[in-house]
Amino acid sequence: MSKPRPPAAPDPVALANAQASANTRTAQEQQRLNLIGTSGPQGTTRYVADPTQPGGYRQETTLSPLEQQNYERSTGVYGSALDTAGQQIGRVNEALGQGLNTQGLPELQGYNAPDFDRQRFEDSVYASQTRRLDPQFQRLERSQDARLAAQGLGANSEATRNLRTDFARDRADAYAEAANQAIQAGGAEQSRAIQQAIAGGTFGNQARTQGLQERAYVQNQPLQQLQALLGTGQVGMPQGIQYSPTGVGQTDVLGAQGLAQNQLNQNYQAKMAQNNALMSGLFSLGSAGIGAFPFPTGGGKPSDRRLKRDIKRVGTMANGLPVYEYRYVWGRKRHIGVMAQDVLKAGIDAVVRHWTGFLMVDYGKL
């Protein structure tokens, strides 16, 4: 009784080659299905076999008579345009070989601080303010002295001192406010002068920029004319109805091999499980002894070839059955007898099947 053998491992090189071959055939079939010719008012296209091409085909285009005539005319016009463009090369080289002429343009202007004496301006504003304040406070001071005299208050009285203190404070606040207004006016005037200087410089730079753009346009005109000549259109090629390419799925050789290998492994595992269960039963029988076999026929010995090992033929019975020397798989002692399979083959009614599934021979019937 032999132990099941595990399935052979797949050859990765053979699998890779098989997948590459399948991919190549898929690509070739997909190419063949997508070689769709077109036909329309402009003409036709078709694919013809050509072994010199990588895919084995080449595309041929045939214009309709009208489009063929237009193509020839367009080619002639394009050729003339190229000739004219060639004649303009000299002008283009001359234009590109010269730098942009900036003579006569306004100079680039930056920011120059304005000539402004802020302190002088502030002093002037302050003087203008004090020319109004001086007579105003002089009148107020005379009016206050007259009221004090009419009330009979002396120069050193407390009421007189309080009034003159308040008067002095009001006059100082008024002159301080005049000074602040002069400072603010000086700052505002200085900012106005700066903005005016910046605006003047910006205007001059804008005039220079416009002049540069005009001269650059004139200088680039020969190059633009050359590009227009070189861009003259040609007759379009025939275009058929939009076709959606056919897709051919690739053969998954590796996946198929994996499924087959998985099935082989499952079969092997099932056989191994059956073999292990069988061996477990046999060794249980062997530990119990041969005599423990219950024979439904009332006699016989386990003679199934699957229960024996070290089998060697030693003779032949009178009825022609081979006689062997052997050991049972669970023991070391050698025995002599026949094989149940040979008895069945000979057609002798001496074989019975044990409940374990193994064959036994009733030697009394041989």
Image (spheres, rainbow, N blue to C red):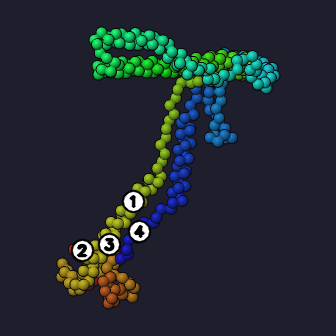
Amino acid of disc 4: Pro
Query: Which residue: 42% across, 66% down?
Result: 7
Residue 262 - label: 1
Residue 6 - label: 4
Q: Are marks 4 and 2 in contact (CB under 8 Å)?
A: no
Q: Tell me: 201 left or right of 2.
A: right
Q: Do the residues labelled 4 and 1 touch (CB within 8 Å)?
A: no
Secondary structure state at the residue bearing disc 3:
helix
Query: Which residue: 28% across, 11% down?
Result: 151
Dot 1 or dot 3, earlier in sequence = 1
Dot 4 or dot 1, earlier in sequence = 4
**Depth check, front residue: 150 or 212:** 150
Amino acid of disc 2: Thr
Query: Which residue: 38% across, 13% down?
Result: 141
Dot 3 or dot 4, earlier in sequence = 4
Q: Position of residue 172 (x, y in %)?
A: 41, 21
Dot 2 or dot 1, earlier in sequence = 1
Residue marked by disc 3? 275
Q: In which quarter of the image is residue 197?
A: top right
Dot 4 or dot 2, earlier in sequence = 4
**Depth check, front residue: 106 or 166:** 166
Residue marked by disc 2? 356
**Depth check, front residue: 190 or 79:** 190
Q: In which quarter of the image is residue 308?
A: bottom left
Dot 1, crowdedness within 10 Å: few (<14), some or many (≥20)?
A: few
Q: Do the residues labelled 3 and 2 touch (CB within 8 Å)?
A: no
Q: Tell me: 316 left or right of 65.
A: left
Viewer-nearest of discs 1 and 3 = 1
Q: Tell me: 233 left or right of 263.
A: right
